[in-house]
Image: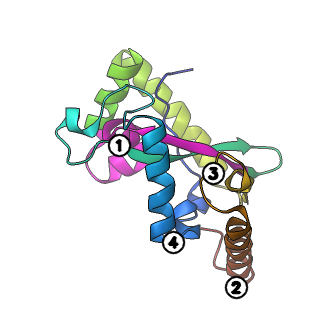
């Protein structure tokens, strides 16, 4: 398994994330909590955005696991990444914004891939993404109720329930699940 992995969220889930559930101030508290836990350094390559001539050190990336049989997308944590590693995680977006070559170069550098190995890895990742994007996924956000999460659990229960109702209403209206 590569040290730096591309993580493409199914297109049916685009726009459904912690920033959609939390207020801006809550999201800021969560991400800054994890930045401090990781000394404001990337958990993958140990660099910071400052090393990459960026105006900020690190970014927060939601970590998801997928149960491809039960169609459950499960939040399992927050990963602290430098901007370049974060761009690789969202390679599809990087390609759409013209930053794909830069992201691919970083992926090659961090993982020690050859160009051919990187291309094969990216193709397999996009194939999985295409397959997963064909389905509606249920989100498991229970990690937000664990001791690892830095916000009040009662508050989080209410925010998660409100998010579930919002998604259900959107599906009923025929608006998809994103």
Q: Is residue 92 magenta?
A: yes
Q: Is residue 89 visible?
A: no
Q: Secondary structure at mark 2?
A: loop
Q: Secondary structure at mark 3?
A: loop
Q: Is residue 23 left or right of residue 167?
A: left
Q: Earlier in the sequence, mark 2 or mark 4?
A: 4
Which residue does the image show at 27% across and 44% down from the upper left?
Answer: 99
Q: Earlier in the sequence, mark 3 or mark 1?
A: 1
Which residue does the image show at 26% across and 47% down from the upper left?
Answer: 56
Which residue does the image show at 45% across and 69% down from the upper left?
Answer: 24
Say above or below: 58 vs 122. below
In the image, 26 versus 141, the foreground residue is 26
Residue farthest to the right, as pictured:
70
Q: Which residues are magenta?
A: 73-100
Q: Earlier in the sequence, mark 1 or mark 4?
A: 4
Residue with the mark numbered 3: 149
Say above or below: 150 vs 36. below
Residue with the mark numbered 2: 173
Say above or below: 177 vs 13. below
Gap in Å between the C-alphas at discs 3 and 2?
Answer: 32 Å
In the image, 62 versus 95, the foreground residue is 62
Colouring scheme, one of rainbow, by chain, secondary structure, one colour:
rainbow
Residue with the mark numbered 1: 58
Q: Earlier in the sequence, mark 4 or mark 3?
A: 4
């Amino acid at each position: 398994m590569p040290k730096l992995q591309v993580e493409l969220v199914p297109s049916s889930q685009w726009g459904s994330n912690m920033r959609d559930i939390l207020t801006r101030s809550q999201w800021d508290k969560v991400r800054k909590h994890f930045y401090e836990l990781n000394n404001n350094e990337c958990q993958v390559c140990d660099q910071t955005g400052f090393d990459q001539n960026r105006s900020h050190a690190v970014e927060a990336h939601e970590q998801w696991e997928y149960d491809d049989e039960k169609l459950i997308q499960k939040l399992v944590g927050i990963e602290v990444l430098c901007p370049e590693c974060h761009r690789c995680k969202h390679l599809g977006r990087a390609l759409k914004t013209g930053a794909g070559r830069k992201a691919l170069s970083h992926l090659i550098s961090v993982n020690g891939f050859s160009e051919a190995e990187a291309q094969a890895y990216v193709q397999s990742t996009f194939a999985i993404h295409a397959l997963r994007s064909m389905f509606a996924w249920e989100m498991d956000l229970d990690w937000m109720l664990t001791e690892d999460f830095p916000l009040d659990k009662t508050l989080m229960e209410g925010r998660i329930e409100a998010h579930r109702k919002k998604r259900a209403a959107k599906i009923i209206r025929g608006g998809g699940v994103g």
